[in-house]
Image (spheres, rainbow, N blue to C red):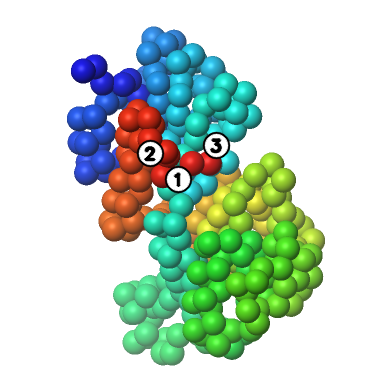
Amino acid sequence: MTKPHILQVGPYPEWDQIPLDAAFTVHRYFEAADKAAFLAEVGPMVRAIATRGELGANAAMIAACPKLEVISVYGVGYDAVDLEAARARGIRVTNTPDVLTKDVADLGVAMMLVQSRGMIGAEAWVRDGSWGEKGLYPLKRKVWGRRAGVLGLGRIGFEVAKRLAGFDMDIAYSDTSAKEYAGSWEFIADPVALAERSDFLFVTLAASAATRHIVGAKVIEALGPEGMLINISRASNIDEAALLDALEAGRLGSAALDVFEGEPKLNPRFLRLPNVLLQPHHASGTVETRKAMGQLLRDNLTAHFAGNPLPTAVL
Ligand code: 8YV
């Protein structure tokens, strides 16, 4: 039996690559020097695209694959997939929700703790001998009991808030509507008002055209010189220029970021800031979770080609 041809947009770990190569004829887009020529050559054969959350599949890529049936995303976020182009041609889209939720929440909370307690600088203080030479490390700000805002109380936001409750934090959230499962957490519809009452603001909402720059200058300034912004969603949810301006001027206390515009290249202004914690988009990056994501990506492809219901369909 001939194996379906698939276009692989970015690399996966070996434990995913081996079964993918066994089940499909895989065309590695990311290895092609001339991407346009590669697409023109293999696109007509391609029936599925296997991609990653941050890479997606744009309109040109979809258009280059006239026989495309399904796009399987390794990641919960599918904002980088051109859904309109897919919908127009009846192309199915799948993602990998749930399996990564708790790891992403863990990293967000870890970033808050590391940043608030100054652990990166504290480590350097030990290693460079400052502890012995200069004495006690400068005092940092506490986390427990303070006010946390969660912007987007979906699966990931909910897990973040649950963890924050363990630190006896005073929790509020914004979303399109109040959530029954939020219990005693306060619902504040307006993100600016949420930021105003928060010491720590977590951005956990799924990105779309509608949420672009939802964290703009007003939200950032409302969080203020003592506030911390933590982003484990997508860079597009934040107005990065406004964020950089506020961090540089001290109008925002600090930020802890796992995602950036144009990543893995990021605005060099971030690198000069002492008040940011920078992470390489790895909130779902544990062996356990990435294995589960790879399995789910393949399960969706396998189900599609077997004519079975897709386990985690977006479209
Ligand atoms: C990435 C993500 O897919 O889940 C998402 O939306 O962005 C991540 O899990 C992951 O970094 C693999 O590329």
Q: Position of residue 128 (x, y in %)?
A: 34, 74
Residue tagged by mark 3? 315
Residue at horizontal 38%, vertical 39%?
300
Nearer-N-terminus badge (2/1): 2
- 75 lies left or right of 19: right
Q: Which mark is residue 300?
A: 2
**Element class at badge 3:** loop
Q: Quadrant of the C terminus?
A: top right
For the residues labelled 2 and 1, the Cα–Cα distance comes to: 7 Å
Callout 3 touching callout 1 (CB < 8 Å): no
Callout 2 touching callout 3 (CB < 8 Å): no
Report which quarter residue 229 is drawn in.
bottom right
Callout 2 touching callout 1 (CB < 8 Å): yes
Residue closer to the observer: 255 or 289: 289
Q: Position of residue 301 (x, y in %)?
A: 36, 34
For the residues labelled 2 and 3, the Cα–Cα distance comes to: 12 Å
Residue closer to the observer: 31 or 137: 31
**Element class at badge 2:** helix
Q: Which mark is residue 312?
A: 1
Q: Quadrant of the N terminus?
A: top left
**Element class at badge 1:** loop
